[in-house]
Image: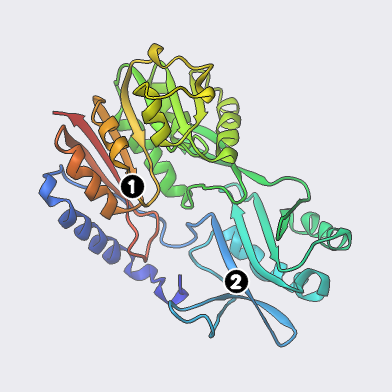
Amino acid sequence: MPTDTVQPERYDDLLREKADRIKAMFASFAPPPLDVFHSASIHYRMRSEFHIWHQDDRVHYAMFAPGNKHEPIFLQTFPVASKRINELMQPLLNVLCQQEILHRKLFQVEFLTTQTDEALISLLYHKKLDESWLEAVRPLEKQFNIHIIGRAKKQKLILTQDFVTETLTVNGKTWQYQQVENSFTQPNAGINEQMLKWTSDVVQGSTGDFLELYCGNANFTCVLSEQFRQVLATEISRSSVQSARHNFTLNGVQNADIVRMSSEEFTQAINKERPFRRLQDIDLDTYEFSTVLVDPPRAGLDKGTEALMQRFERILYISCNPETLQANLNTLSQTHRIERFALFDQFPYTHHAECGIYLIRK
């Protein structure tokens, strides 16, 4: 995101325009009034990545205007990134510039931080990393109180650990989440807390069991597990499944299971179209699913998953793409009505809109 598009003084007006666009997009479904959740206007992103540009015997953080990869925009600060990222950016870069082994063929730096100022930094290279690189970079962990990972082709060197632990507060209770480098995590922690509170509120008083597809690191699963008898979650990413299990333990969640499956595979399993070895320890017949949550990628739900969703009494749909959400609602609205409608401003100053829809069977 070019820094000249960050205009805190215009934040409220820009969010109002985004909300009006979303209202117009979904007007044909006759939704209830839109709940709009504001982000902080600066320092809201817990993770950021920067290209590295080599010039004048130095390396620089660089971004590019859309369609122009030859004229870098050098960055001293990045106002949308967390305060911790901004505090680290230039001091870290200065140290990298001082040692050729640390900056030679460096092409990208990625930051992952938490609301408690934990920081993990990944340095990406077009060269093989060896013991001399490790010796040079190791003191930086103590100097900056950070964790460092080195990445190159077919290489991932972890100095101490490859994750941070985020702490989120929802309805006065704290939850902890392992967030692994290079795995999906919610980038805007403040908005994530609001999404968790909203989803928790809308399912208040639900009965039966809970199914979640595309659960990631169990971000929603942990909080919502308090509202249900049993919980079953699915996720295709192996590292996210491992983090989800870790987060169940971290938060004392004892009524949830997770299986590594795609939504398409789970649809086949619940329809008894084929057996899956990954489900050998889970008896789907013991679940009485009443509520399902989906948080799919930008492509939205496939037709089979759409049909599966229509079998549940209540549907929670968290969407990062209003266009595919709109397309999926053309099907889901045949059997369900929209009870709650929300806009979460996950990415201020951009056209991106994170939406939440809660549907109940007609």
The answer to whether residue 99 is seen in the rendering is no
In the rendered picture of this protein, how many numbered marks are placed on residues?
2
Up/down of 63 relative to 145, above or below: below
Distance from the alpha carbon under mark 2 to that under mark 1? 29 Å
Task: Determine which quarter of the picture holds residue 176.
Answer: top right
Relative side of 141 to 52, left or right: right
- Decide if residue 149 is on the left or right side of residue 44: right
Check disc 1 and report the residue beneath it: 300
Res. 47 in view? yes
Residue type at tag 2: His
Task: Using the image as rendered, state which of residue 106 and residue 112 is in the foreground.
Answer: 106
Locate residue 351, reporting x and y percent. 32, 64
Q: Residue at x 48, y 29 (%)?
A: 222
Quadrant where the C terminus is found in the figure:
top left
Q: Residue at x 88, y 62 (%)?
A: 132
Q: Using residue 233 as the reference point, say whether residue 142 is left or right of it.
A: right
Q: Position of residue 228 (x, y in %)?
A: 38, 19
The residue tagged 2 is: 51
